Amino acid sequence: MKRATERDHAPIFIIMMRECSDGAFEDAASGTFTNRNLPVPQFTSGSSNGVFTLTTSALSVTYNYVSGSPEFTPDNLRVQLLGQDGLTGSWAPNTTNTGNLLGTLRTLDGVDGAIKLNCTQL
């Protein structure tokens, strides 16, 4: 039996979304997704009445692309966790982050020296 690794599970929880109001989507690496050469999980997708849905075994993304706003908003974008590995809940843009994973700020703001990494205290 093969032991599951983080690499085996990560792709079903990762969806890269970019706003591109000018229609010029750039399919390129980012600070978050420097290595995009990961296995693509099984998924289904479809569009009906101006709503695009993409679903993996772990989550479902719903985007209303005729909402009138070119930006992602709580009214046109929602990610729903489907209970895999006990994870449930949902996310939309501007959702208050109560479970921040913290991380590095140096790469984002050029801070030189020690800094508290709790983004809720900035």
Image (tube, rainbow, N blue to C red):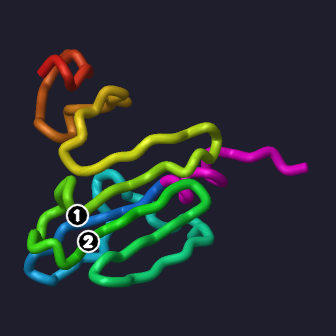
> Are circles 2 and 1 on residues that touch, CB within 8 Å?
yes
User: As drawn, is 75 to the left or to the right of 14?
Assistant: left
* Residue 64: image tag: 2
Residue sitting nearer the eye, 110 or 117: 117
Labelled disc at residue 76: 1
Local packing at callout 2 (Cα closer than 10 Å; few below 14, some 14-19, many 20+) is many
Q: Is residue 97 magenta?
A: no
Q: Is residue 32 left or right of residue 96?
A: right
Q: Which of the 4 quarters of the picture holds residue 101?
A: top left
Give, as a three-letter code, the residue at label 1. Asn
Query: What is the quadrant of residue 62 in the picture?
Result: bottom left
Q: Relative to residue 47, is residue 96 depicted above or below?
A: above
Q: The C terminus is located in which quarter?
A: top left
What are the residue bounds of the magenta stretch? 1-13
Q: What residue appears at the point 33 percent right and 52 percent down from the top-left corner?
A: 32
Image x and y of residue 57, in percent: 61, 60
- The image shows residue 13 at horizontal and vertical percentages of 51, 53
Most distant residue in the right direction: 1
Q: Quadrant of residue 94?
A: top left
Instruction: Tell me the chief SS of the magenta region.
Output: helix
Q: Is residue 7 magenta?
A: yes
Residue located 30% across and 68% down the image:
63
